[in-house]
Image (cartoon, rainbow, N blue to C red):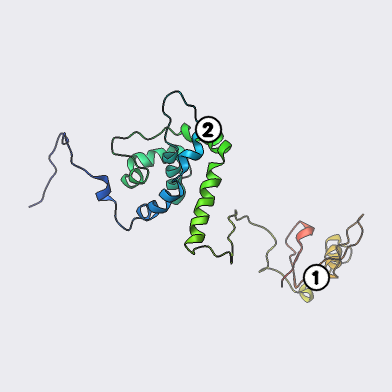
Amino acid sequence: MMGRQDRDQGQLFYEFNLDDVIARDHLLRRMNGFVAAALDDLHPQLRPFYCDIGRPSVDPELLIRMLIVGYCYGIRHERRLCEEVKLHLGYRWFCKLDLTDKVPHHSTFSINRLERFRESDILRYVFERVVAASMAAGLVKGEGFAVDASVMEANASRYHGKAPDELEWTDGSVRNERLRSIWRGSSRKPGRKTSRMAGPAPTTAQMANPNPDLIVNRLE
């Protein structure tokens, strides 16, 4: 027989444990132990930047845990981050919020970032703690590094060049004359002294680039 929800009013009292609904292999549960260790002495580090009187502030550990959630799940806007933490049980569990706990206002992040977090340099401190813990666990060996950068389109490319014998040298072309000078191993430009270019001889040239400083692509 087909079931149907026929309930006009929710239950008045619930017996609910937030920890029971978070899977054991969930990313946030696996991260929680390392995050707790990295933030272990967070409050002593930030205590000099808080007043001794007044209302209790939002817990700085809560703010940093929310920022970690935003980073891991690609939530870049703090207003949306607050909304997602309010709705998502896993985010609430990781941020140590119960079902009835209030999520901080999004403006709280801006105030702390521009004042306490910047003055105390606490984010760098947490980052160094994470790196030190990763080194102690053998996860960081110093054999390589990664760079986070923005990908931008460019006319010069090592995959779209031409060999020297495939180029058309037009007489009177300033562009080709500058290309010849670079190809001979010099960087002669009008009004400037000639200087030798270090490195191996170029093997390809980019003719589509309007910037003559990037005409030649040097390959090892």
Whether 145 is drawn above or below 96: the answer is: below
Whether 105 is drawn above or below 191: the answer is: above
Name which residue lies at 21% across and 43% down.
Answer: 16
Which residue is tagged 1?
A: 168
Which residue is tagged 2?
A: 49
Q: Classify mark 2: helix, strand or loop.
A: helix
Name which residue lies at 41% across and 28% down.
Answer: 56
Crowding at dot 2, Cα within 10 Å, few <14 / some 14-19 / many 20+, comes out as: few
Q: Position of residue 145 (x, y in %)?
A: 59, 62
Q: Position of residue 180 (x, y in %)?
A: 85, 68
Q: Position of residue 195 (x, y in %)?
A: 88, 63
Q: Gap in Å between the C-alphas at discs 2 and 1?
A: 67 Å
Residue 33 in sight here: yes
Residue type at mark 1 is Glu
Write down the quadrant of residue 218 in the picture. bottom right
Write down the quadrant of residue 210 in the picture. bottom right
Whether 172 is drawn above or below 89: the answer is: below
Residue type at mark 2 is Phe
Q: Position of residue 113 (x, y in %)?
A: 53, 36
Write down the quadrant of residue 24 in the picture. bottom left
